[in-house]
């Protein structure tokens, strides 16, 4: 058995040649050998290895799809499929990487799939993996950082933020008023993203002022006049600084708003119209038109009819001026009438004018003749038994007379007997229901001298004919009372409650009296037989409910009961009962809106109407009579009232939005039923802002200190302004008053920027005013003073005022020790420690013969003069200030001994 005793590695030894020797146990032993060749098979125990684990490369933004970016290589020492390498992008890379790049699985070539955009993605990190084709492969990773180089492929974009209403400028604005903030943006980088803007216009009434970077202010360059120039068209141009510059333009249309100085003018001085009488209500009569030369609400016209004795006959649409008749007009009552129409604009102050309208009615043939004679009148329009006897005689003895014998009166009344023929006929109407059988005798007597007679008993049975329709009798039952064919029943009764007793009968007999009774129609009632006893011709039923009643859905029912007999043809009859459903208080009041939001202006007059809420109750009578009340939140308590009858809500005091901007009121509507039911609704009163607050600076004055030599457009301070109002009334615009261009202020942040670099030595203090104007109508404003103190920077070296570098002084050997032999003076135009000077001798004093006062600049003799000291001494005096870093100046002092 050949056993592996140590782990094999094909990549080190791919095969082994082994010599196997076998020995026997003989003496001497003999042996034999065999060569065993062991080939080590490959196992996928090696992962691919990239030539480089991370790479960085650059590509131009405008590279075309299909561009080869890099050819990645990776090796695997395994054999066969275990050593065959394929490349792929990691499944963890973002979707935009997968969309933008691809890699050839065999060659490792990274290819650009789509156009690049530096502005969206300036760089990509691509995770490339390589794996072999063996079982259970373990991939290798390579990070490729692809940097996109920007090209100038984006034109500038222009964004405009208007100071107030977009594109609308008041003609009352003074010169240099701020109109809009212009911001030019370019998505490119470097010089490709630097933008310069300018304005193209016909009249020069506007100008651009650069504030910082790519931001400009659009200002008025003169006073505006709407009557001359109601509209301006300006063109903004922006161009970047790229090698092949791109530009953009934007056209601005600026409309000039005006004051309300024109009253409405009608198209005619007088209007006349004719129309036929007997018109339908709301008939269009005429359209009145007026025009107002002003703009906006100043030119918005509303129409109304002036009160007069005939103003109730017509109405006018306040917006269109269409005049309609409110009712049918009658020529016989009024052949013509005149009224006045008033047209009002909505400006402040409001202006109005009026015009006369004359309406003429045209007669139509609307009265027919009336017939008086003649008086019309109406008109109107009326069966046999034969008794036969024989007589064997002859002549008169055989002639027979027939007479009734002992016949009751009813027989004689209903029947007639012919004396000669014995024919019995009916001489009047016979009604089986009155007489069902007639019993009588007929006497037959001959005319002989001794007359003989015979009697016949006759029984006439009246056969029933179906000549009687069933009769229906409806009566009250229990506590349900009936009066005049009407029953009253409460809507809260239970199902199967009896509301009436119905008795049905038929005077006929047999099948003609067999009656079927039903309730006709779709009503919540049915008949239930009162008992199983009784004949077919007389039955009793209970009329009872089948479902619950609801007064609010159906207030009354007409119940039609139909009875049909079984005769041929059948006869039927009907009777009806009106059931009045009596309301119970089972419905709570319901408001038309559960939540009502009301916008109500502040500074109102006490007692003004805020809104009116309406609730309804599906019940009736007192159950539907409503009483309104308020349950306000604590903050609104005592501020509002409500009319119990109408639901009209009024405010008791003047509201101030700055104290509270909304109130929540719970409105309760209670009916007068017993017990009373309630419904509730919520009224949210949002207090609208009025421009009643001036802008307010947080400080009464501002002092800022800035270092000199700051670059232009650096911030020098920040102011805070608040306005207690809201919306446009609180939108504050800041401007620099007495603006000479030295300072600008950023609206929104309140940051003051300098347009110059300060030099304290030229000007150490700047003072100006800031103006804050809100966007209300009319606007409110406030002013504040600003002082800018320029702090010194050590930007000036001391300069020597004395002595001059060309002057000299003669010293004699007799000069005393400590004697001042020269005086150095210097000045520094800085301030503070930057101007505090110290003096020192920097050179030219090898013998230490002289000394200088560090603060005074006085040079004194410190040693006695010897002969070796004779000659010219050139002292180099250094004058330094105490700034950080210090600056200095030098002076040459010539002393000749």
Image (tube, rainbow, N blue to C red):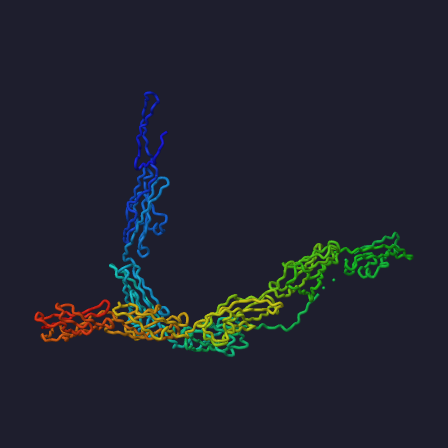
Q: Nearer the viewer, residue 309 or 824?
A: 824
Q: Is residue 642 left or right of residue 472?
A: left
User: What residue occupies the far top of the structure in this picture?
Assistant: 27
Of the 4 image quadrants, the one containing the N terminus is top left
Examine the image and state in which quarter residue 2 appears.
top left
Answer yes or no: is residue 223 visible: no
Give the camera-side residue of 766 and 426.
766
Q: What x and y, as percent, mark residue 281?
A: 52, 71
Q: Residue at x 22, y 73 (%)?
A: 829
User: Which residue is outermost to the bottom?
Assistant: 309
Relative to 518, does residue 625 appear above or below in the rendering?
below
Q: Could you tell whether 155 is left or right of 500 in the image?
A: left
Q: Nearer the viewer, residue 23 or 199?
A: 23
Count of numbered labels shown in the rendering: 0
Question: Within the image, what quadrant is residue 735 found in?
Answer: bottom left
Q: Is residue 261 visible?
A: yes
- Along the viewing direction, whichever of 93 and 370 lies nearer the viewer: 93
Measured from the top left, where is residue 868 in percent x and y?
8, 69
**Quadrant including the C terminus:** bottom left
Query: Residue 553 at x, y = what percent?
Result: 60, 63
Give the percent coordinates (x, y) of residue 716.
30, 69
């Amino acid at each position: 058995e050949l056993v592996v005793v140590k782990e094999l590695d094909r990549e080190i030894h791919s095969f082994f040649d082994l010599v196997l020797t076998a020995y026997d146990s003989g003496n001497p032993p003999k042996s034999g050998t065999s060569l065993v060749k062991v080939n080590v098979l490959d196992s996928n125990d090696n992962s691919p290895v990239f030539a480089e684990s991370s790479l960085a490369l650059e590509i131009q933004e405008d590279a075309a799809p299909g561009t080869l970016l890099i050819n990645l290589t990776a090796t695997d020492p395994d054999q066969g499929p275990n050593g065959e390498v394929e490349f792929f992008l990691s499944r963890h890379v973002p979707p935009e990487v997968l969309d933008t790049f691809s890699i050839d699985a065999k060659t490792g070539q990274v290819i650009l799939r789509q156009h690049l955009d530096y502005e969206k993605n300036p760089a990509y990190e691509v995770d490339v993996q390589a794996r072999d084709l063996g079982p259970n492969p373990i991939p290798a990773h390579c990070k490729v950082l692809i940097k996109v180089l920007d090209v100038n492929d984006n034109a500038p974009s222009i964004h405009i933020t208007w100071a107030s209403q977009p594109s609308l400028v008041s003609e009352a604005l003074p010169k240099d008023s701020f109109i809009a903030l212009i911001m030019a943006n370019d998505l490119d980088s470097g010089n490709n993203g630097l933008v310069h803007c300018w304005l193209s216009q016909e009249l020069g009434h506007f100008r651009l002022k650069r504030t910082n970077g790519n931001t400009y202010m659009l200002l008025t360059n003169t006073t505006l006049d709407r009557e001359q120039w109601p509209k301006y068209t300006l063109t903004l141009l922006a161009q970047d600084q790229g090698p092949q510059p791109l530009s953009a333009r934007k056209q601005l249309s600026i409309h000039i708003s005006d004051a309300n100085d024109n009253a409405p003018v009608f198209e005619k001085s007088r209007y006349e119209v004719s129309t036929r009488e007997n018109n339908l209500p709301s008939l269009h009569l005429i359209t009145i038109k007026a025009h107002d030369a002003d703009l906006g609400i100043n030119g918005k016209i509303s129409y109304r009819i002036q009160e007069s004795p005939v103003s109730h006959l017509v109405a006018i649409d306040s917006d269109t001026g269409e005049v309609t008749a409110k009712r049918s007009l009658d020529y016989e009552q009024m052949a013509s009438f005149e009224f006045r129409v008033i047209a009002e604009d909505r400006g402040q102050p409001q202006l109005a004018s009026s015009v006369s309208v004359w309406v003429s009615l045209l007669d139509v043939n609307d009265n027919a003749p009336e017939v008086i004679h003649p008086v019309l009148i109406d008109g109107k329009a009326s069966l046999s038994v034969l008794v036969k006897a024989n007589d064997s005689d002859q002549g008169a003895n055989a002639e027979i007379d027939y007479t009734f014998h002992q016949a009751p009166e009813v027989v004689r009344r209903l029947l007639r007997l012919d004396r000669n023929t014995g024919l019995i006929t009916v001489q009047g109407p016979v009604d089986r229901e009155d007489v069902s059988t007639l019993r009588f005798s007929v006497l037959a007597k001959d005319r002989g001298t001794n007359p003989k007679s015979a009697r016949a008993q006759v029984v006439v049975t009246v056969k029933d004919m179906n000549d009687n329709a069933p009769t229906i009798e409806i009566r009250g039952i229990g506590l349900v009372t009936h009066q005049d064919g009407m029953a009253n029943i409460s809507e809260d009764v239970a199902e199967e409650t009896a509301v009436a007793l119905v008795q049905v009968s038929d005077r006929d007999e047999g099948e003609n009296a067999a009656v079927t009774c039903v309730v006709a129609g779709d009503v919540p009632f049915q008949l239930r037989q009162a008992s199983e006893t009784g004949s077919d011709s007389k039955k009793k039923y209970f009329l009872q409910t089948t479902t619950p009643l609801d007064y609010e859905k159906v207030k009354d029912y007409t119940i039609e009961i139909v009875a049909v007999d079984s005769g041929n043809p059948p006869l039927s009859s009907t009777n009806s009962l009106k059931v009045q459903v009596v309301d119970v208080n089972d419905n709570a009041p319901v408001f038309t809106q559960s939540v009502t939001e009301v916008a109500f202006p502040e500074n109102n007059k006490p007692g003004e109407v805020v809104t009116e809420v309406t609730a309804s109750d599906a019940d009736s009578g007192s159950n539907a009579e409503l009483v309104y009340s308020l349950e306000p939140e604590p903050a609104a308590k005592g501020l509002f009232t409500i009319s119990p009858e109408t639901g009209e809500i009024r405010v008791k005091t003047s509201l101030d939005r700055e104290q509270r901007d909304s109130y929540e009121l719970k409105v309760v509507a209670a009916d007068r039923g017993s017990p009373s039911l309630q419904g509730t609704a919520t009224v949210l009163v949002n207090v609208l802002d009025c421009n009643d607050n001036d802008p307010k600076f947080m400080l009464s004055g501002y002092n800022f200190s800035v270092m000199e030599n700051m670059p232009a457009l650096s911030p020098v301070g920040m102011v805070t302004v608040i306005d207690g109002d809201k919306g446009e009334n609180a939108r504050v615009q800041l401007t620099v008053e007495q603006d000479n261009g030295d300072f600008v202020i950023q609206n929104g942040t309140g940051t003051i920027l300098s347009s110059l670099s300060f030099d304290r030595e030229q000007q150490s203090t700047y003072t100006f005013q800031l103006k804050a104007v809100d966007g209300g109508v009319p606007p409110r404003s406030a002013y504040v003073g600003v002082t800018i103190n320029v702090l010194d920077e050590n930007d000036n070296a001391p300069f020597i005022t004395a002595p001059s570098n060309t002057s000299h002084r003669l010293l004699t050997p007799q000069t005393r020790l400590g004697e001042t032999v020269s005086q150095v003076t210097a000045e520094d135009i800085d301030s503070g420690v930057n101007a505090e000077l110290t003096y020192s001798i920097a050179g030219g004093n090898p013998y230490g013969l002289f000394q200088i006062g560090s603060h005074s600049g006085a040079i004194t003799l410190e040693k006695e003069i010897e002969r070796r000291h004779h000659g010219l001494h050139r002292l180099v005096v250094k004058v330094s200030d105490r700034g950080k870093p210090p600056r200095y100046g030098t002076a040459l002092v010539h002393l000749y001994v």
